[in-house]
């Protein structure tokens, strides 16, 4: 058994007043040189707001996606329907500009302000004085990790299951020969 | 870098747009925001133009610290010749517009001419487009902003807009952003309306560069501690500005029944705590919001709990609304204050002016100067909540004879109403006074009498005069960065030494308006909050501009003098720096022992003004002396540097 530190930012949307200090500081933290610019469009946190309903929801840039999702859900909060995209953490989703660097188009994913030496608390948490964002570190016990298959391996295994080992091996050999011939 | 934001000249008559950099030498002279706007107004308008004609110029700007790592740099400044006073028009608002303007590449907009049809400006990453706004005309300030977001498909667009009052050229219409952030005073919304300009929409994704990033961040932490540890900021963050009422009304500093009394006796329902209760009941425990990057978060959110507007959302009310729709008209109900606030916000109306003028009309009605024929049957008595609300509708829509008359502002309305009506109007330079009663506080009275945009409490008010701080503390505040060894007094009834305090505060507020920082983050309500020394450091760390505290002081002085030159050019004389007779003739009838019986002494007040002019380097007529202008390098205006 091993221990793993899990870093958690707890978001209390009730406390958030939409001041956008977190956006500004996140963009500054990731600037070169560090803190050298502000530009919330480059932040890895985005505060969604609907002041008419006192709704301020900070959302972090999460997993990277290549394609937009097929079905869209709807959220109903305080009797108003919101598009799921509003609360979606997907980074670089082609359906929107969010969490994409406006200049380079590169994905903007929250990295918990990784730094050396590491920060006491992520920057957005530090500037959020109303505690809408709070930081926790948790030690979690982990099962001895099973050897994890990466994506390619997983793909190959599926093919082997389907076509049998020999056929897949043959095909691979053939492709590799023809590729070599090309170059 | 933070100094590379541009100035755009937008001619709405010709549809022509030109952008230019702002040279460093100009920055050093005026920094940005209100200071540079004042310079531009002086340089880009001819004397004696019609404020509602195409020759007036609308200036919209961010402060030089906007969107940097400094705190509370949310402020947008708007300037033009005022259609209300005919003198300097100037108004300032919080929210999120100015930082967005900077991320979109601009610091200053100079808007000239008049569009043929309603238009709005779409400003995005260095580009400016004039777009049709026919479909937005007639919409409320909130509807307009949301319609633009939808039309351009971006939730993060921020807009400065006018409502129906601005369209109808109500001479005290304001410009708004968000639900309640208002560039309220002097009728800047009417100027926008006269140009057929419904809105300015901005969105930017361009970096603002910080000159000395790590130090800027570190230094700002000190700032934040200073602000969040000040008790006044904490209270304000809990209750908003209505908390002030709790101190001023019991003391006797709130004018009531227009200007007959100085305390509202039936105010239980409009106290800060009650308003807070309503916000808690209708929104929830977390009902305070704020402006960009601000730790104070003084903006309450609420829904109107009952009445014809039950359930409607709005923000505020501020201290101003408690007086405008509570104290002055002697209305007792929170619903009235919340409704008045809401309607003013949605119509885009300066609620201070609206409440004051309606209360004035109430006194005229009770005096028989206005009759029910003039009011189209409306029983315009003090304390008639429905009449008050109805008058707000009439003013914004210029409905009925009286609604239309009041929409013209106090002085013009007084001409129309005739008789003795002018005697009852509580104004300076044609702009209504806040509901605060300054008869027991000569320093505050001097501030409103001499403020460059007409009667105003945010131009030079030494609010800390009311705290009776020990003289050493006052000396520490008021001898920096310019030494002052003259008298200072802890007694708010004193005349001696007060002109210096007013002069100092005026310079301080000009400084803060050039930087684009909120006034609640400087020596206004709290004596310990940052000013010149901190600004010098913050300015350097964020923008790289090296200016000593005295350099910033000089910039502010220069800008104050340009404003003075402008006003003099438009006909201002010493007589305009004066209060209405009731300040001198009618003593306070209610309040604490140190208030009751107080009135302003004419002779002493005259001396105060002399002294105040002297501090400014102005002659006995209030005209800047040639050597003053020379010292500040503005003896050859207009100099057309931009
Ligand atoms: S800093 Fe905190 S309060 Fe401000 S927008 Fe971010 S999460 Fe909300
Ligand atoms: S934790 Fe760091 S990287 Fe993530 S959103 Fe906050 S400031 Fe940005
Ligand atoms: S103190 Fe209030 S008005 Fe000033 S910036 Fe903060 S929230 Fe806005």
Image (cartoon, rainbow, N blue to C red):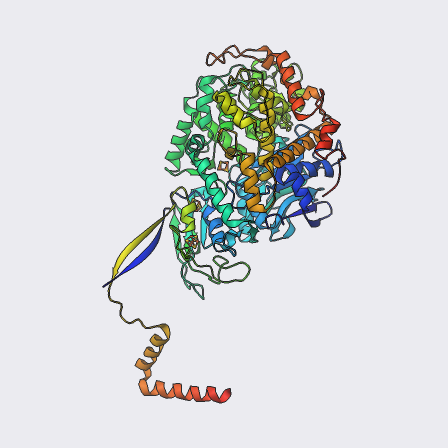
Left or right of B568 on screen, residue B247 = left
Any part of residue B607 in sight: yes
Counting from the top left corner in percent of width and height, residue B428 is at 63, 22
Q: Considering depth in this image, is B492 or A19 the residue closer to the camera?
A: B492
- In the image, residue B175 sits, relative to residue A6, either above or below, namely above
The outermost residue toward the left is A1
- In the image, residue B53 sits, relative to residue A91, either above or below, namely above
Counting from the top left corner in percent of width and height, residue A120 is at 38, 50
Q: How many marks?
A: 0
| Residue name at image x 63 percent, y 23 percent | B450
| Residue name at image x 47 percent, y 36 percent | B315
- Split into 4 quadrants, where in the image is the C terminus of chain B? top right
Q: In the picture, residue A70 is in which quadrant?
A: bottom left
| Residue name at image x 68 percent, y 31 percent | B563
Counting from the top left corner in percent of width and height, residue B559 is at 66, 34
- In the image, residue B185 sits, relative to residue B139, either above or below, namely above
Counting from the top left corner in percent of width and height, residue B17 is at 70, 49
- In the image, residue B608 sits, relative to residue A95, either above or below, namely above
Any part of residue B169 in sight: no
Q: Considering depth in this image, is B529 or B411 the residue closer to the camera?
A: B529
| Residue name at image x 64 percent, y 22 percent | B612
Q: Considering depth in this image, is B191 or B620 the residue closer to the camera?
A: B620
């Amino acid at each position: 058994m091993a221990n793993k530190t899990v870093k958690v930012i707890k978001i209390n949307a009730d406390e958030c007043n939409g001041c956008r200090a977190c956006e500004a500081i996140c963009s500054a933290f990731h600037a070169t040189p560090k803190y050298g610019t502000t530009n919330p469009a480059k932040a890895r946190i985005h505060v969604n707001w609907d002041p008419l309903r006192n709704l301020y929801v900070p959302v972090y840039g999460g997993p990277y996606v290549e394609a937009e999702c097929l079905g869209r859900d709807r959220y109903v909060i305080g009797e108003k329907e919101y598009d799921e995209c509003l609360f979606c953490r997907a980074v670089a989703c082609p359906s929107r500009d969010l969490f994409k660097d406006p200049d380079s188009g590169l994905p903007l994913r929250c990295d918990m302000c990784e730094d050396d030496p590491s920060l006491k608390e992520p920057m957005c948490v530090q500037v959020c004085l109303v505690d809408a964002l709070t930081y926790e570190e948790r030690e979690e016990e982990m099962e001895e990790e099973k050897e994890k298959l990466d994506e390619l391996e997983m793909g190959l295994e599926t093919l082997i299951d389907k076509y049998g080992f020999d056929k897949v091996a043959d095909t691979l050999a053939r492709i590799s020969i023809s590729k070599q011939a090309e170059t | 870098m933070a100094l590379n934001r541009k100035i755009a000249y937008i001619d709405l008559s010709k549809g022509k747009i030109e952008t230019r950099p702002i040279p460093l030498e100009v920055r050093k002279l005026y920094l940005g925001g209100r200071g540079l706007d004042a310079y531009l107004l002086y340089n880009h308008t001819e004397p004696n133009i019609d404020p509602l004609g195409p020759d007036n110029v609308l200036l919209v700007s961010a402060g030089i610290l906007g969107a940097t790592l400094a705190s509370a740099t949310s402020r947008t400044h708007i300037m033009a010749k005022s259609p209300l006073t005919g003198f300097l028009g100037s108004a300032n608002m919080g929210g999120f517009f100015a930082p967005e303007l900077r991320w979109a590449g601009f610091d200053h907009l100079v808007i000239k001419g008049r569009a043929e049809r309603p238009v709005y400006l779409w400003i995005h990453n260095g580009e400016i487009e004039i777009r049709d706004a026919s479909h937005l005309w007639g919409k409320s300030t909130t509807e307009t902003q949301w319609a633009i977001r939808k039309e351009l498909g971006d939730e993060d667009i921020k807009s400065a807009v006018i409502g129906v009052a601005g369209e109808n050229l109500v001479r005290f219409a304001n410009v708004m952003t968000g639900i309640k952030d208002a560039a309220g005073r002097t009728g800047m919304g009417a100027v926008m309306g006269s140009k057929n300009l419904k809105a300015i929409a901005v969105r930017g994704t361009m970096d603002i560069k910080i000159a000395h990033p790590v130090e800027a961040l570190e230094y700002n932490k000190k700032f934040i501690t200073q602000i969040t540890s000040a008790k006044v900021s904490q209270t304000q963050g809990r209750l908003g500005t209505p908390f002030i009422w709790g101190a001023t009304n019991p003391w006797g500093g709130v004018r009531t029944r227009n200007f007959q009394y100085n305390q509202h006796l039936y105010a239980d329902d409009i106290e800060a705590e009650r308003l807070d209760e309503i916000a808690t009941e209708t929104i929830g425990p977390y009902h305070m919001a704020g402006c960009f990057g601000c730790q104070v978060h003084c903006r309450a959110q609420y829904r109107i709990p009952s009445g014809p507007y039950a359930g409607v959302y709005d923000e505020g009310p501020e201290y101003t609304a408690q007086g405008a729709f509570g104290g002055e008209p002697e209305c007792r109900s929170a619903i009235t204050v919340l409704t008045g606030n809401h309607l003013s916000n949605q119509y885009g109306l300066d609620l201070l002016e609206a409440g004051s003028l309606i209360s004035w009309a109430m006194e005229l009605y009770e005096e028989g100067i206005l009759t029910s024929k003039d009011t189209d049957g409306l029983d315009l008595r003090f304390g008639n909540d429905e009449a008050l609300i109805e008058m707000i509708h009439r003013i914004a829509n210029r409905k009925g004879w009286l609604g239309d008359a009041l929409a013209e502002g106090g002085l013009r309305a007084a001409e129309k109403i005739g008789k003795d009506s002018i005697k009852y109007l509580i104004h300076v330079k044609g702009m209504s006074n806040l509901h605060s009663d300054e008869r027991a506080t000569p320093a505050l009275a001097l501030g409103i009498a001499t403020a460059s945009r007409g009667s105003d409490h945010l131009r030079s008010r030494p609010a800390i005069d009311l705290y009776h701080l020990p003289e050493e503390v006052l000396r520490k505040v008021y001898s920096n960065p310019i030494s002052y060894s003259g008298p200072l007094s802890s007694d708010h009834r004193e005349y001696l030494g007060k002109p210096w305090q007013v002069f100092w505060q005026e310079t301080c507020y000009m400084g803060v308006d050039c930087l684009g920082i909120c006034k609640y983050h400087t020596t206004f309500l709290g004596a310990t909050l940052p000013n010149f020394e901190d600004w010098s450091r913050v300015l350097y760390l964020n923008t790289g501009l090296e200016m000593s505290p005295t350099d910033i002081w000089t910039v502010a002085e220069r800008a104050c003098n340009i404003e003075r030159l402008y006003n003099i050019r438009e006909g201002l004389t010493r007589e305009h720096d004066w209060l209405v007779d009731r300040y001198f003739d009618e003593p306070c009838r209610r309040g604490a022992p140190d208030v009751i019986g107080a009135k302003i002494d004419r002779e002493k007040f005259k001396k105060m003004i002399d002294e105040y002019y002297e501090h400014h380097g102005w002659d006995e007529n209030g005209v800047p002396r040639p050597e003053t202008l020379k010292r500040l390098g503005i003896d050859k205006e207009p100099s057309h540097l931009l």
